[in-house]
Image (cartoon, rainbow, N blue to C red):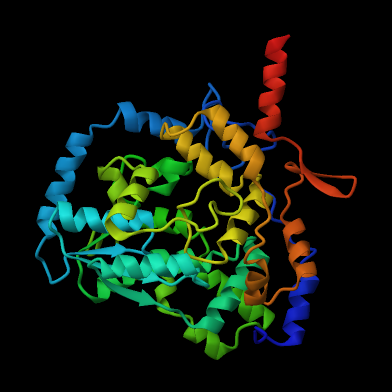
Amino acid sequence: MKELWSPEVEQRIRDEAENLDGQTGPEEIEFCKRCVVSNQRPRITFDDEGVCSACRFAERKDEGIDWDERADQLTSLLDAHRGRGHYDVLVPASGGKDSAFVAHTLKHEYGMNPLCVSFAPFIFTDVGLKNFNSFIQSGYDCITMFPNGLIHRKLARLAFEYLGDHFQPFPFGQLCYPMQMASKLNIPLVMFGENGEAEYGGDPAANDKPCWDTADWDRVYLKGTGVNKLVEIGMELGAFTREEAREVTIFYSLPPMEFDRNPEFHWLGYYKKWHPQSNYYLATERFGFEANPDGHSEGTHSKYASLDDRTDGLHYYMAYIKFGIGRCTSDAAHEVRDGDITRDEAVALVERYDGEVPKIYMKETLDYLGLDYNHFCIVVNRYRNPRIWLKKNGSWKTRKNVYDAKKASTSAAGH
């Protein structure tokens, strides 16, 4: 694939690769007593009983939320918007299980007329594209944004180098583009899926709200930086020409608006109890959704989540590198909270799958980012938090993990 920038810019980035520090997180690693997540997850909190905020939220979903009242709130919200235009709600939709559930619920349970909007993956997988097409053919209008490919690749490479996550430009577009389109097309309501901060453990500011406030959106979703920070870095390095910087699409940024005005932003998960496995079953039945043909995704036991992008594996692997929390930890922890598996089962799954190096699409991913394997390893090792990682006999090992902690606890109890 064509080089992203000049050899001089490439060398400058490589020279800086040894000198950046991305270390964050609490000094002492702790694991939730109910699930398998650790306190290294950004913004998660643990209470005095050693239970994480995501598990406490799941507890509230079971016992502390009046879902009938929330259903009435949803009915009132949709009644107020139904028929306000040809499309009366916009749904960010990739054809995956969750967005399919949202679109189906709004259209067939509440009589809304949704416009679905998607922001294209970096590189479609075969099954992701097939599921997307199946969703559209089942009866939904959809607009897809394919951003400028060269600029998108440059943003991804810069995000990998300077944020430790090449994926960041995608959520910038995935979150902002629907709001831009709703504003331009005068669609009064945008309905996303779940509040990920509440479901997976994070900032609690909107745990009891149907949406983020404007300031929270920037702070949590855009990491306080957004696309402008990456463009600024790119300009300083010479990676972006002035013309390219001007061409960075507005769809990576929010429209000038407040979320208590038109268009409104809401999570369906605020109104309906969110359960990913149920969404999967519905998508399979209604849209012919297909799971991962390999049986499970690399780095996890799960077969039905985040199937769209060939570069997904690197995103989850870097979370493991930076926080010691791999894809399986995240998936298994949620399934424990949902009551689908036990904590012991989750611990066994984490031991088997977490931190698995994504190999199937690795060459294609590195080619896309303009990386060779040696420089990839330099960047990966730069983001290894020394509180999490130890190099022993030439190999990197986690200093503490949930399965060794469980074995130690079981051994101590036996004595």
Q: For the N terminus, give its image quadrant.
A: bottom right
Please identify the quarter of the rendering in which residue 154 is found.
bottom right
Look at the image and tell me in which quarter the C terminus lies. top right
Measuring from the top left, give residue 207's x and y in whole percent: 36, 41
> Residue 120, image x and y in percent?
43, 72
Image height of 66 relative to 97, above or below: above
Considering depth in this image, is 311 or 181 the residue closer to the camera?
Answer: 311
Left or right for 280, reference 230? left
Q: Nearer the viewer, residue 183 or 309?
A: 309
Residue 291 visible? The answer is yes
Q: Say how many tags the image has.
A: 0
Give the vertical position of 80 relative to 153 (above or below).
Answer: above
The residue closer to the viewer here, 135 or 227, is 135
Which residue is at the far right? Answer: 393
Q: Name which residue lies at 53% across and 52% down.
A: 295
Q: Position of residue 256 (x, y in %)?
A: 33, 70
Which of 227 and 4 lies nearest the eye of the viewer? 4
Residue sitting at 14 percent across and 41 percent down?
72
Residue located at (67% from left, 48% from top): 355
Q: Position of residue 371 (x, y in %)?
A: 71, 74
The quadrant holding residue 177 is bottom left
Q: Is residue 256 visible?
A: no
